[in-house]
Amino acid sequence: MSGGTKMIDREFFSGNRKKFYDMLEKDSLAVLFSGVEIRKTNDEYYPFFAERDFVYLTGIDQKESILLAMKDSSGTVTERLYVLPSDLMAERWTGRRLTPAEAEELSGVRDVRRTDPFAADMHALAASGRFGNLYLDLYRCSSADIDRPAHVFLKKAQSEYPFLAVKNANALIRRLRTIKQPCEIAALREAEKITGAGILAMMKVSRPGMFEYQYKAEFDYVLSQHGPDGPGFPSIISAGANNFCIHYYSYTGQAHDGDMILNDVGAQYERHITDVSRGWPCNGKFTERQKLLYECALATSDYMFSIIRPGMKMADVDRTIHQYNARLLKDAGVLDKVENVGKYMWHGGAHHIGYDVHDVVETPEIIAPGMAFCVDVGIYHEEWGIGFRLEDNCLVTETGCENLSAAIPRTIADIESVMRK
């Protein structure tokens, strides 16, 4: 966890589980897995990253943990949490494992067991004849994705318990994750502060000749002063021609006088992730062409924050960003026809944030209070060698919206002022 004030406690996770259980059909089992380590090479694994839905329901991010819920014919729910057994040799190498008492304190689940009996427990429940449905989190981003534990378990269930109707728990949980609760919004606010401090540090040291990895080092150092979590996703930090690679992670380029620095970064606080983009000239002074394009992006962003409110169609956020910016670019003489805006705008302008940087939510048709998503205006003019994006985080309120990242310098005057200091 990040240092500082704690925003999210076990009451949040217990409440999430109750809402989830309320959506389950009667006579159902639900099984969710935290995930397993993925091997990187030889005896090394990639850093473990728990399944976000599992964390959303339990607060547990330890590998090979399992949540089992049983909803009977009366609608009564019984829940169990399984965590890895103590293993002194394994823990000597890779750190302590949660005790059942610690797992109960984090999650609010009172029945916490070691994982050893899970298979036998599950078989007894599935074969009891009391349950007709099995809910699994079967999310895939792509058909090429590797099988997660839920997909492996699905194959076993289809073979051994074909009488259980399999249902997708992910569809239910992403519906819950669409609306952020007050404690989540508080966590996002803290993450915004940390993100802003990291961006300011990069702006203040920026100069021609710096390498991208040096900018990244400045950002990472600031985040490390706020706790061990660091960035919520791999930072995108680029200079000059590298700005035309939308998801750029090499950090090997060097900023030359006149280049724009593009960064798309975000800290996390209590697992809640921000996503903020700022662009600035490495020498601290915008050229006339840079000013022209940046003012179009800024005016578009400001316009969006003036119109986003409950009742607006979610699809209209991205559509309006492109349409409004296209008109500005055309009026500035940059774009010949508004329908050709794709020449300079290469990606979407809105995605939800939260437990994932591109949060896995039920994409809403209509915007509602408590939703948090990005307003992202990217302009890429290869002929002029200018590429950047201005991305802020929007919280929908009862009457309109709030720019959560507004305090991070975003006007030309504010950026140049910060860089002169």
Image: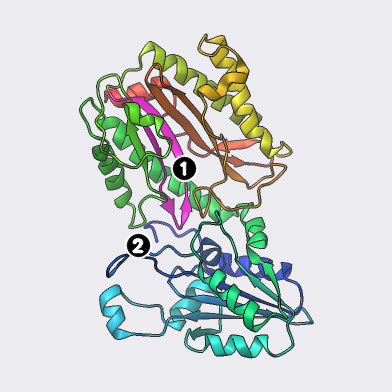
Q: Can you tell which mark lies on residue 363?
A: none
Residue at x 54%, y 21% (from the top left corner): 299
| Lower position in the chain sequence, tag 2 or tag 1 | 2
Is 317 a magenta residue?
no
Residue visible at 56% across and 78% down? 109
Identify the residue under disc 1.
275
Quadrant of the snapshot with the N terminus = bottom left
Query: With respect to residue 407, does 303 lie above or below?
Result: above
Q: Is residue 159 above or below residue 328?
A: below
User: Which residues, given as a range, are shown in magenta?
Assistant: 262-282
Work out how far the residue at label 2 is from the one at label 1, CA to CA, in angstroms. Answer: 23 Å
Left or right placement of residue 188 versus residue 197 in this view: right
Along the viewing direction, whichever of 378 and 339 lies nearer the viewer: 339
Q: Is residue 420 visible?
A: yes
Q: Which residue is mark 2?
A: 46
Indicate whether residue 264 is drawn in magenta.
Answer: yes
* Dot 2: element: loop
Q: Position of residue 418 (x, y in %)?
A: 32, 27
* Residue 264: x %, y % from top left: 41, 38
Of the 4 image quadrants, the one containing the C terminus is top left
The image quadrant of residue 317 is top right
Proximity of marks 2 and 1: CB atoms separated by less than 8 Å: no
Amino acid type at circle 1 is Asp
Is residue 229 found left or right of 61 in the rendered image? Answer: left
Residue 49 falls in image quadrant: bottom left
- The residue depicted at 52 percent of the width and 26 percent of the height is 345
x then y, percent, for residue 350: 57, 38
Q: Determine the main secondary structure of the stretch shown in magenta.
A: strand
Snapshot colouring: rainbow
The answer to whether one can see residue 399 in this image is no
Furthest-left residue in this view: 209
**What type is the residue that disc 2 sits on?**
Tyr
